[in-house]
Each structure stands twice: as C-alpha cells, then as structure tokens.
C-alpha cells in the first residue's frame, strides 16, 4: 500500500517542483486534477490528451522522481439541470477517462453529480428525507436521471478499461455506501467508490464497517486519506448538517482536518488493516483541506502518520496457523 497525494493543494507550484517536493517527503504516488472543481494546474487535459510528446514528458518527470499516478481527478456535476454545465462536466469526465487510458492510469475520481428535483427545476436538489411525499418522488426522479447517464458513462469506462471512483459527498446523489452500491448495481463493475472517510465521519458512519461493506463487492477503486473532526460543543446544539462557511471554524459542527488531527494514528492503522483485509493495495491519496494549517504543513503531518501506518511488505505464510 502506498502513500499518495492529490496535488491540488500544491497548484501554485510547477509540476516538476511539486513532484520534487513530494518525492523528498517520501511520497509514492500522485493524483492529478484535470478539470472540474479540482482544477487542472498540473494536468490540463487539452494539452495532454492525444499528445504523445506531452505524455512522454509527464512520464519522464514521474520516473525522475520515482512516482506514479494513482488516479486522474475531475470532480463536477454531470447531472446538473443546466444543460451547458452538465455537458461541460460530462466532457471533462469522458476525456479524463480517455486520458487515463492513454497514460496507463487505471482510475478516475469524480462525483456522482446531483440532478434537480424534477424536469422543470433549475437547481440541483439534495434530498435527505422521504417526506413530504414530493421529496420521495423527487428522489425517484433523480435516480432515473442518474441511471440513464451513468449506464452510458460506465460503458465508456469499460471500453477504456478505466475504473471510476466516485467520492461519496454531501450535495451529491451518492453520498453514502448504500447509495454507492445502488449506482453500481444499476451500471457495471467499473463504477465504484473513491472512498473518502472525511464526508462519512460527520454522518455517523463507521469507517471500517463501510470499507468492509463496499469491499465485499470489490467496489473501492481508489482511496482519499482525509480526516474530519466533529466539534461536539457545536453539534450537540445544532447537529451536523452545518451551513456555516468552512472558514468560520469556531462556529462549525465539524471541520476537515489533516490526518491525525481528527482521528489518531491507531485509527488510521485500523483503516489500513481493514483495507488489506478486502485486498485493496492501491494508494492512500492525501487530500489537504484543513483550514487551520498550511498545505505544506498539513501534507507533511499527514504523510508522517500514514508512513507509520501502511504496510510495506506483503503478508508471509501464517506459519503459526
């Protein structure tokens, strides 16, 4: 299992400088943004897609720093009710899959997207309760929209032999593990999770049980290492569905934190062990979104914890059994 980094937090640095810095920190893998909310500072799709020279330069830089690409990232909303926005997100995702194929990268990370609550609505609608009944009907409509889109997208992924890792995220149709399996069952095995614990912690989901739940279906295609701290002095009063800005830290019920600042090293060792039990042996890609520290310090502290947590060897024979 490898320690990786989503390089978006280092977007102000050149590709080579970011690679050199991460290699110096002992990182094994990089996840590169190529569109959508994560941007494309280090991998503009238009410059690399179908360009063998540009792709060769990227590979040379990776080889120089002894790194590999764990996934390409393009997080957006391909189910948006605005046709233009949905089309742009769809193009980003399809081209990311094509570019991943050309680069020999086996995964693309993204969101499921979120439709409106009905065919005449203009705004995506996150449904979190079945009553009043129009909300249940809206949710059924959203799944019809999602199944039509993702069934086609899944075939595109299959044609390129690239797995799609959907990040279970609030304000998206797929935001928890049962919804993740629902979408997979309606599409194919190329659709699975980019398992990001940070969005599940505050929902009260047990992380290792969720890993086992999805792992039984071989439905974890990538893993984001990101922590969250629930601040109970606030959550006991207003719950965890918190609309305070992320930068109003004292007033929020929860915050994204660097690895180790939401849950300790023992927890992350348990996560690594559970991932090994389900035969996940890919990267733990650190995503820095901790507003209480700088990207470099947050990444370095996260790398430190994970390097002490991951296994570097494969299991030997159980001679004691």
Image (spheres, rainbow, N blue to C red):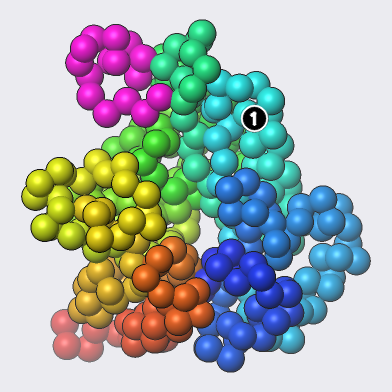
Front residue of 42 and 159 = 42
> Which span is picked out in magenta?
125-139
Residue under pointer 1: 85
Q: Secondary structure at mark 1?
A: helix
Q: Is residue 160 visible?
A: no
The residue at the point 33 percent across, 67 percent down is: 257
Tell me the quarter of the image containing the N terminus: bottom left
Q: Position of residue 275 (x, y in %)?
A: 33, 66
- In this view of the protein, which residue sits in the foreground, 321 or 129? 129
- Give left or right: position of 218 versus 202: right
Q: Is residue 149 left or right of residue 268?
A: right
The spot of residue 215 in percent (x, y) is 33, 54
Q: Residue 68 at x, y = what percent?
A: 63, 74
In the image, residue 294 sits, relative to residue 239, either above or below, namely: below
Please say whether residue 291 is one of the residues in the magenta stretch: no
Residue furthest bottom in the image? 24
**Residue ID at (88%, 58%):** 51
Q: In the image, is residue 137 part of the stretch drawn in magenta?
A: yes
Q: Quadrant of residue 143?
A: top left
Q: Is residue 142 left or right of residue 318?
A: right
Figure check: 227 above or below 17? above
**Number of numbered callouts drawn:** 1
Q: Is residue 55 visible to us here?
A: yes
- In this view, the residue in front, 55 or 220, is 55
Q: Is residue 63 above or below residue 101?
A: below
| Residue for point 86% across, 65% down | 54
Mark 1: few, some, or many residues within 10 Å (few <14, many ≥20)?
A: some
């Amino acid at each position: 299992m490898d320690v990786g980094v989503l390089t978006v937090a280092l977007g102000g640095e050149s590709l080579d400088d970011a690679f050199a810095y991460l290699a110096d920190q002992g990182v094994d893998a990089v996840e590169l943004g190529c569109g959508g909310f994560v941007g494309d500072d280090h991998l503009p799709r238009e410059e690399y897609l179908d360009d063998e020279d540009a792709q060769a330069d990227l590979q040379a830089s990776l080889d120089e720093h002894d790194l590999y690409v764990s996934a390409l990232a393009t997080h957006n909303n391909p189910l948006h009710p605005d046709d233009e926005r949905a089309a742009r997100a769809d193009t980003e995702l399809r081209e990311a899959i094509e570019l991943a194929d050309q680069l020999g990268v086996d995964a693309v990370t993204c969101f499921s997207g979120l439709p409106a609550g009905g065919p005449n609505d203009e705004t995506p609608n996150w449904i979190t309760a079945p009553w009043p009944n129009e909300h249940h009907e809206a949710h059924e409509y959203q799944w019809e929209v999602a199944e039509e889109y993702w069934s086609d997208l899944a075939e595109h992924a299959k044609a390129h032999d690239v797995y799609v890792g959907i990040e279970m995220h609030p304000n998206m149709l797929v935001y928890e593990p049962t919804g993740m399996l629902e979408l997979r069952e309606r599409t194919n095995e190329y659709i699975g999770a980019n398992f990001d614990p940070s969005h599940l912690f505050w929902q009260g989901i047990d992380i290792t049980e969720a890993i086992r739940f999805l792992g039984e279906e071989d439905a974890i295609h990538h893993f984001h290492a990101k922590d969250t701290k629930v601040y109970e002095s606030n959550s006991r009063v207003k719950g965890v569905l918190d609309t305070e800005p992320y930068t109003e830290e004292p007033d929020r019920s929860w915050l994204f934190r660097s690895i180790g600042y939401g849950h300790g090293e023992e927890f992350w060792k348990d996560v690594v062990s559970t991932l090994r039990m389900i035969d996940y042996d890919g990267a733990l890609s650190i995503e820095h979104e901790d507003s209480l520290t700088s990207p470099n310090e947050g990444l370095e502290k996260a790398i430190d914890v994970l390097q002490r947590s991951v296994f570097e060897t494969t299991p030997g024979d159980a001679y004691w059994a």
